[in-house]
Amino acid sequence: MNKLMNPAKNIGRIFYINENVLKTTNKPVFYEIIILIKTICLIKIGDKMNVLYVMIGGFFGAICRYALGEWLAADRFPIGTLTINLLGCLFLGWFLTSVSERKTVRPETVLFIGTGFTGSFTTFSAFSLETINLLKNGYELLAILYILASIILGILLVFIGYKLANVKGGAG
């Protein structure tokens, strides 16, 4: 296999990828992970570090999301996802406003915290799925409440985060 077909082989021979074997294993998730790894290996060196920052931030954000979601788990209303998404809105509004005010924050920090951590901590897909499940189980009023609370409170909390960051000394 040439270098272009197997770029992962170039990074210390950690991975050996034989696509023909992978395609016949009937493990599409594993195959997709290998394709993702190969794609990352094709990215320019400088961009690989950015991907690494996002991945590490995403790792910690996902763990925090899981832990908080388990701690706040409820029977009918998805209070865990709502709380997580609203906390993410407040934080991201504050964080990105603070970063834009301070020129000393490195772009890698924004990728790690803003894109990686907060991106994996919050989730629109869980919100969407839980809304469908509420509707499917006959909880139309709870679904409407969930949608309205998520959108209205989310926008409000981003605005509050923005304002908190703009308070004298809040961004510094």
Image (cartoon, rainbow, N blue to C red):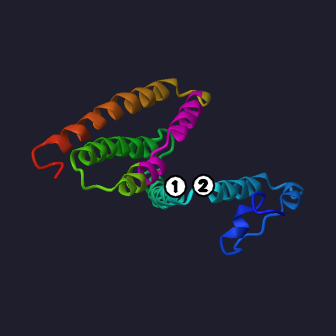
Name the spot of residue 168 as percent of width and height, x first: 9, 45
Q: Secondary structure at mark 2?
A: loop
At a point 18% along the width and 49% down the height, the residue shown is 171
Point out the residue furthest to the left here: 168
Which image quarter holds the N terminus? bottom right
Residue 43 numbered tag:
2
Circle 2: is it few (<14), some (14-19), or many (20+) Cα within 10 Å?
few
Name the spot of residue 25 as percent of width and height, x first: 87, 59
At a point 69% along the width and 69% down the height, the residue shown is 10
Name the spot of residue 123 as percent of width and height, x first: 49, 43
Q: Amino acid at mark 2?
A: Ile
Q: Amino acid at mark 1?
A: Asp
Q: Secondary structure at mark 1?
A: helix
Q: Is residue 137 left or right of residue 85?
A: right
Name the spot of residue 63 as percent of width and height, x first: 48, 60
Over which residues does the magenta segment extend? 115-135
The span from disc 2 to disc 1 (Cα, nearest Å) is 6 Å
Q: Which residue is mark 1?
A: 47
At a point 24% along the width and 50% down the height, the residue shown is 103
Query: Mark 2 and 1 residues: CB-CB less than 8 Å, in contact?
Result: yes
